[in-house]
Image: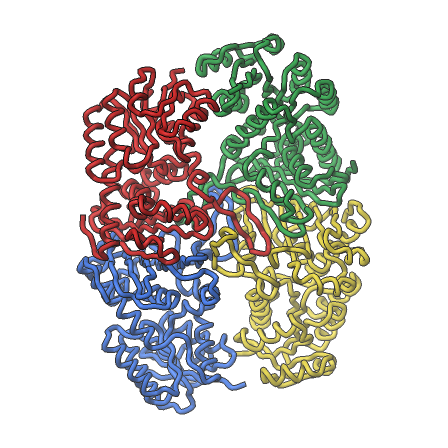
Chain colours: A yellow, B red, C green, D blue
Amino acid sequence: MKKIKIGAVGLGRLGRKHAENIAFRIPNAELLAVCSVIEEEVAEVQKSWGVKYGYTDYNEMLKNEELDAIFIASPSALHCQQISDALDAGFHVFSEKPLGTTLEECKLAEAAVEKHPDKVFMLGFMRRYDPSYAYAKKKIEAGEIGKPILFRGYSQDPEHAIEGAIKYAGHSGGQFIDMAVHDIDLARWFLGSEAKSIYAIGGCYAHPEFGQYDDGDNVSALMQFENGAMAFLFAGRTAPHGYNVETEIIGTKGILRIASVPQKNLVEILDEHGVRKECSQDFLERFEQAYVDEVQEFVNCIIENRKPDVTVYDGTKSTIIAYAATESFRENKLVRL
Amino acid sequence: MKKIKIGAVGLGRLGRKHAENIAFRIPNAELLAVCSVIEEEVAEVQKSWGVKYGYTDYNEMLKNEELDAIFIASPSALHCQQISDALDAGFHVFSEKPLGTTLEECKLAEAAVEKHPDKVFMLGFMRRYDPSYAYAKKKIEAGEIGKPILFRGYSQDPEHAIEGAIKYAGHSGGQFIDMAVHDIDLARWFLGSEAKSIYAIGGCYAHPEFGQYDDGDNVSALMQFENGAMAFLFAGRTAPHGYNVETEIIGTKGILRIASVPQKNLVEILDEHGVRKECSQDFLERFEQAYVDEVQEFVNCIIENRKPDVTVYDGTKSTIIAYAATESFRENKLVRL
Amino acid sequence: MKKIKIGAVGLGRLGRKHAENIAFRIPNAELLAVCSVIEEEVAEVQKSWGVKYGYTDYNEMLKNEELDAIFIASPSALHCQQISDALDAGFHVFSEKPLGTTLEECKLAEAAVEKHPDKVFMLGFMRRYDPSYAYAKKKIEAGEIGKPILFRGYSQDPEHAIEGAIKYAGHSGGQFIDMAVHDIDLARWFLGSEAKSIYAIGGCYAHPEFGQYDDGDNVSALMQFENGAMAFLFAGRTAPHGYNVETEIIGTKGILRIASVPQKNLVEILDEHGVRKECSQDFLERFEQAYVDEVQEFVNCIIENRKPDVTVYDGTKSTIIAYAATESFRENKLVRL
Amino acid sequence: MKKIKIGAVGLGRLGRKHAENIAFRIPNAELLAVCSVIEEEVAEVQKSWGVKYGYTDYNEMLKNEELDAIFIASPSALHCQQISDALDAGFHVFSEKPLGTTLEECKLAEAAVEKHPDKVFMLGFMRRYDPSYAYAKKKIEAGEIGKPILFRGYSQDPEHAIEGAIKYAGHSGGQFIDMAVHDIDLARWFLGSEAKSIYAIGGCYAHPEFGQYDDGDNVSALMQFENGAMAFLFAGRTAPHGYNVETEIIGTKGILRIASVPQKNLVEILDEHGVRKECSQDFLERFEQAYVDEVQEFVNCIIENRKPDVTVYDGTKSTIIAYAATESFRENKLVRL
């Protein structure tokens, strides 16, 4: 069995999880190299998992000719340059979302991808690979809900994670770019069209700290797409019950809801609080399988010489919409795209 | 519009509710008389609701020739004699369950009903008239679940009502007669057959007080019916979440569950306890509509000159099974009927 | 027991139901008179229910001095004049929603109400009296969800009722006025504030017939309120599963959802379609109890000499917002109030 | 990182899945050898997954000194002898359930395990390792539901798999041994006690074919345990909705339910059938993660030199109870243990 040899850059919380998945949960992949500017992280991962090569310099890793592909989970501002460099160095590339932090960066990445049509490039919109989302998509493609009318997407982080969110607020780009971009991608994917108008509102309902970054702790947006379909997005940082990512697609003949109860597992509790389900508490818990399945798809694409469903343009287009939402929210006006 | 004139005996918690329903929620009924050995209750109800006649002596009420029907919600031990007397006095009769507290009493009631075939007699197995149970019954009759295989019935009182249950334990006849008799009736009704074998177990898991009456605080029984179908009953007094009456009928082609979440209403709460529904807390809350609908059916039967679905024999047969379960539980043996 | 004597005008589908509730389900009310321009309706109702007085002329009914209150369920365009006339004639008044079909009409009704401060006036926003909505409101007032962030209200009619909707489309005033006005009232009630900006979109996704009336078959709106809270409304006429009225209130400390599954009853079915609940199919089924409880409250207010929670101003203010939404939808622009 | 080298015997449907999990989903395990009497299976698996050694003779495999552990997923009748041989050959052993098909076989396995106290032996009661069951167990151990009163376990195969079940019926040992043994193990595990009395009933409600093997297509049993707790088991082969394994543990202070809706994923569908969830269709779908997690635990036990929660005695004791249930069912009598 051919194994795709992967070098992973970025060993933060999510990056480490990705690296672990590549090492142990993707049959036809091998984690051959890891890279991080933090030397201890590299050493620790190499030792724990028996990874052959370790780097603190990304460009050094790109010189490793044993590698087939580069997996990028570094800080967002580095994504596009690293994508471009890796493609130019002859590698297939997977990059975590967001594609970039500015439109210029996204365009740079687009150009690099276009320059290397023989290479697989994939962007980490993992929700598309979650078993439930993938199942919903198939039903829609099979016509089971008719013509989509409204997409509703919620992305809520739990209140208990608020400290980290406040600390990171200055770098997040705001909730539309940081959180709602996933829902924007899903809306585009499920509706099969692009947004043409957007009105966004919100505020700091519990945590005024976000105000100094022109952000809110809870925001929402209403969009109309070119094909007439509607999308409503809600992103919040104060969910009392846990990590809540829920989606609804209302069609003319059926309606699909994904995770309207963000259940932790299949246990139901009956006690003095009533009949209840406990909830997922973070994205690694909720999307554990999706994080595996997206990388599996990336590896399969390389082996089978085909391109994944998520393209570099999905990154750019979602970013454009997220920026438009941010503009609408900050200036309290209707934005047309 | 013809109104059936009713005299109600018994003004305890449930009796008073019935009287109120007759007075105000049954269009073609009129609460013409009330009777209770507690004189103040009679006076209070007469005054509050403008009831024309009040009695402290049941036999006096039976002399009132303006009345069409007698509604019995007195203590269980009086039911059968009062049924017999009312029928002999020329009235239609509705009696709360249980039919009687001994088989001899039940037989007395049967004889009285048989002696007056022109009179409507109805027993208060109200669950059959609950909109959800009635809906399930229709589906079964329409063949939607095929042939019934297993009936499962739970009747759980909330732990917070335990004090009253302990106080009443000496008079309850035990949980099979006191609580599970409703499920026994439902099992017979849904399965369309009679029990032929029964094994019952249980114990005092939280409240040893029930032990002195040869009762448990939680008991269960497994029965096989003459047509081969199975029934599992569970009755408990320590439900942590509320008043839980749930039923499942497993058929060869479909399964129906009634109230597997005993929700108080349509509100769902998402908070630090997860995603939850609060629960019904007592039988008046859960079966409010059923208590109205059964009396409406009684009145309709009188007006339309027909007989209700629940007969005096349902009372006797359910009692026989409840006694067999009690015997099985107390003597730890298999009982064949 | 004092009974409030009521004269009811309008005996259409909902009007007849109201009249029936007044006659039989409100203990301290009496349906003393009915009025309709359709003579046969009047005769039929009088005969069936034994109603003493019947009228085909509303002003004749207002001369009946035995009456205490007038109940208006006539066509919307007549509401305000009838309200004004009835108040001037010395009656307490209940009017079905909408208050009026134009703002001028609403102002007329306001003036009449203000002129008769000793009279009870109540508007039929029955959802507030639905047990689940009332329960949610109490939780919010008790601070259980903290500060409201987002209100989400769906009002979807079933596709199987589309023919009637198309026929009535020319008179409906559009979906915001016809359907979403209930959600607008709920949003104002739950959020405790007034809308300040609104963006509405939508279209004809399945039934182009609505286009000729500048209406859609599915529409939505995003609003921000003066206190910063957000509201998202969705109204549709093509629900595949039934009559779906669902509401969510997201707060800083808790979230409440009302009827996110519009279940017909407590029966759950397990068959080849999976595990499922069947749904309510129209507003009379869903809000049966609310239609009783709101009238009970009206009658209680008269007896106890107090004013109901729903005022004439709720009618005007909801109408203003519904018009603003319609304007936003038709002209595809952001409307500020 | 040390990798445990495993030789797997049995490459049927479940055996192949196990082998695949060992090869690709258990980081610290290596599938070094496979064994099956079907030569093509061995060749195919070796080639597809790059497995170093292939055998058609189990005893040959036991001579391979590179191996650390043997994984048994062969036909049930071979389990105990293979367990004994592998332990004697110096290997750690994992065996699929059931431990054996007769009590004598089980005793043979017990003796072998006792003879090699330094070796890890584990039995494949995978449900204990399902994330939801493991979560429930922790809650019970933490005292969250108080003292267990009743265990309810359903194991239902879908009707669409009936053909295979009929074909296999002669070898299955009957439903209590074939299917309910998992629930018996769970009951013992959750209740922390052993059964002392059992009454079992059932029949052929849809498929008389099972009758010739003294089996039913749906059976149930009620048991009392030594600590007084009760257990109700239901096993069926005609589930209309899918593969339904659900469990309830009723305690004095709380109730836990696991998978009362056997949902396929997190997608909810709203259409003409109501609001519904589609269901899991077989055990590989439902217990995919459990099959991985149990083997991970086996490997961890070897590495960490400790014993797993499931012992050889769990196999024997569950078998004894399953036989008692079968006897009770066949002879229609109460069996005491």
Horizontal arrangement in the rendering, residue A206 relative to residue B318 (left or right)? right
Res D111 → quadrant: bottom left
**Res. A119 in view:** no
Quarter in which the N terminus of chain D is drawn:
bottom right
Q: Is residue C287 above or below residue B29?
A: below
- Residue extending farthest to the front is B39
Residue situated in front as seen by the camera: B58 or B293:
B58
Q: Is residue C18 visible?
A: yes
Which quadrant is home to the C terminus of chain D? Answer: bottom left
The residue lying toward the viewer, choosing from D86 and C31, is: C31
> Looking at the picture, how far across and down is residue D187, in whole percent?
36, 64
Residue at 61% x, 59% y: name it: A243
Number of numbered discs overlaid on the protein picture: 0
**Could you say where residue B157 lies in the image, as x and y percent from the top left?**
40, 47
D232 sits left or right of C67 in the view:
left
Rendered view: A33 above or below A162? below
- Seen from the viewer's position, the closer of residues C22 and A153 is C22
Residue C298: % across, % down: 59, 25
Residue D307, image x and y in percent? Answer: 42, 80
Where is residue A8, by image quadrant?
bottom right
**Residue D241 relative to residue A1: left or right:** left
Q: Residue at x 29, y 60 (%)?
A: D223
Q: Residue at x 44, y 42 (%)?
A: B282
Whether residue A300 is situated above or below residue D280 in the rendered picture: below
Residue sitting nearer the eye, A332 or D11: A332
